[in-house]
Image (cartoon, helix red, strand yellow):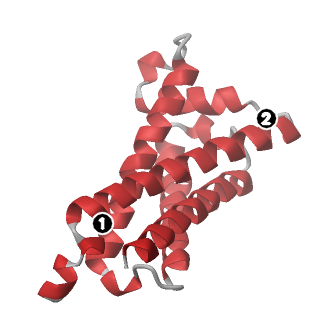
Amino acid sequence: MSLTTIQHPAYRFDRILSIGIAAGLAGGAAEVAWIALYASLSGADAAAVASGVTLTLFPALGAHPAAEALGIALHMAIAVLLGAAIAVALRTGVPRLAGTIAEPPAVIGLLVAIWAMNFLVVLPVVNPGFVELVPLGAALTSKVLFGVAAAFVLYYRSRRAR
């Protein structure tokens, strides 16, 4: 990365972080909307998914009356961190992708890899019941939609900065 690239407003760290936070918020909201839609069409329990996030991260609070709301808040906080991490990783690791047509598939690919690690490796050990709340295909769709929403924000905001 050249000094010119680093000084470009689209590549300043505070700008990258801002874009990443927006991407995470968009991605997290897309997942919440998808799970709500999926639950309403399939009879699944969206509240159980939200509570499951709380149970996974804070087992003692899993049965608390506020577990559902806390789960959504935790989900969105993780989404923001994930969006910021992806933006930083792509903007500093592969800066030439920013605002190109190749960026959205890269973002979605990263999210699919994260989903695979989470649902196939981590969650079966940490909270096996969470993996059974929605079918793996619905969970994967959720993460792909996160990727699409986050990629849109990253792409659009990068193009505007040019």
Q: Check disc 1 and report the residue beneath it.
A: 88
Please state which of residues 101 and 116 is positioned toward the viewer in this rendering. Answer: 101
Three-letter amino acid code at the position of disc 2: Ala
Mark 2 or mark 1, which is nearer to you? 1
Mark 2, secondary structure of its residue = loop
**From the viewer's perspective, is 86 left or right of 117?**
left
**Mark sitting earlier along the chain (2/1):** 2
Vertically, is 61 above or below 14?
above
Q: Quadrant of the C terminus?
A: bottom left
Q: Position of residue 30 (x, y in %)?
A: 62, 50
Whether label 2 touches label 1, CB < 8 Å: no
Question: Could you classify mark 1 by the number of other residues whose Cα lies within 10 Å: few (under 14), some (14-19), or many (20 or more)?
Answer: many
Q: Hey, which residue is sitting farthest top in the picture?
A: 65
- Name the residue: 57% across, 57% down: 146
Mark 1, secondary structure of its residue = helix
Q: Position of residue 97 (x, y in %)?
A: 40, 84
Q: Position of residue 119 (x, y in %)?
A: 56, 52
Three-letter amino acid code at the position of disc 1: Val
Vertically, is 132 above or below 145?
above
Q: Check disc 2 and report the residue beneath it.
A: 44
Q: Position of residue 127 (x, y in %)?
A: 52, 37
- Name the residue: 49% across, 24% down: 70
Please state which of residues 157 and 23 is positioned toward the viewer in this rendering. Answer: 157
- Name the residue: 49% across, 53% down: 118
